[in-house]
Image (cartoon, helix red, strand yellow):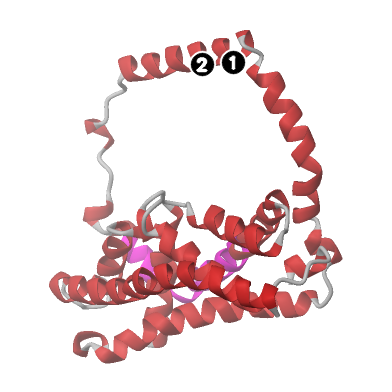
Amino acid sequence: MLINTMGYKPIISNLFLSVIILYFTNLIIPRGGEVSRCLVISKYEKIPFVKLVGTVFVERITDLFAFLLILFVLVICQFGFFKTVLNYPGFKINYSYHHFKIFPVLLIFILITILVYSMIKFKIFNKIYLKLKKLKGEFIEGISVIMHMKKKINYIVYTFVIFLLWLLMLYVVFFAYPPTEKLSFIVALLTYALGTLAYLLPIQAGIGAWHFIVINCLFFYGIDKEAGMIFALVAHTFTNLIYLIFGPIALALLPVLNNTNESS
């Protein structure tokens, strides 16, 4: 919808495969998926890369607002859970053990000063400014699509449907695992929402952080940590196995499908 608003008509198969490549890349390079997706679409659809980056920016802002709304509703509905977590001794931070380290901070300051001085001396700032000025127009066009988009209500509805499908993908695992099969939908929603925070970190597919959050969410609802660990391992592993298998397939299919399209 965002790309169509700019006047381009990309092929659905290219967009779909680019999303598979996005998740596959994220398993290898933290946060590298969005770049790879834009590169794929730019290559096969001949759409300027910077414009696509602008649409990704709009997507992420949309996701952020949707996620914050879901989290706000959860805090109201599950206030007791959050109160228990905040009062739990294991989550208390003892600040007496944290001492201010002057040397690392001073070293970082000196390195930044040297870097900035070098960039000024060799006029790198001027070169960057001219390049950004050239690209600014395309980026602004990419992020302004939301203002000109038709059927904005559809866009909002689709956003929440995407979140719902992600949630259901996790929720179905609850039924497949005896220790969690009796847990309610709201527990799955809470686990999903808090687990999503792990993907904000610069870690491949939230590995480790996602498991930690999910294990502790389930622990507060009576699932022991060993059972929670198995649940998190199964739920996360099988999702990412899909990307590991279909990522290379998507990379192989793209040139074949696009050669066929060009021939026809």
Q: Along the horizontal axis of the image, is 122 left or right of 2?
A: left
Left or right: 168 in relation to 62: left
Q: Position of residue 11 (x, y in %)?
A: 68, 75
**Residue 249: % across, % down:** 42, 73
Q: Where residue 233 sits: x, y (%)?
A: 23, 71
Label 1, on which residue? 119
Tell me what residue is drawn at x 66 percent, y 14 percent: 123
Location of the N terminus by quadrant is bottom right
| Magenta range | 64-85
Are the two marked residues, 2 and 1, in contact with CB atoms closer than 8 angstroms?
yes
Does 74 lie within the magenta span?
A: yes
Q: Please, what is the three-letter code of the amino acid marked with disc 1?
A: Met
Q: Identify which residue is drawn at 60% across, 68% down.
A: 66
Looking at the image, can residue 61 be seen? no
Where residue 164 appears, as percent x and y from the top left, is 52, 81
State the quadrant of the C terminus.
bottom right
Please tell me how crowded label 1 is: few (under 14), some (14-19), or many (20+) other residues with Cα within 10 Å: some
Query: In the rendered structure, which amino acid carries the disc numbered 2?
Result: Leu
Prevailing secondary structure of the magenta residues: helix
User: Looking at the rendered structure, which numbered label has been put on residue 264?
Assistant: none
Q: Nearer the viewer, residue 20 or 116?
A: 20
Q: CA distance from mark 2 to mark 1?
A: 6 Å
Q: Is residue 179 above or below residue 89?
A: below
Element carrying mark 2: helix
**Which mark identifies residue 115?**
2
Q: Is residue 240 above or below residue 90?
A: below
Q: Circle 1 sits in a helix, a strand or a loop, which is it?
A: helix
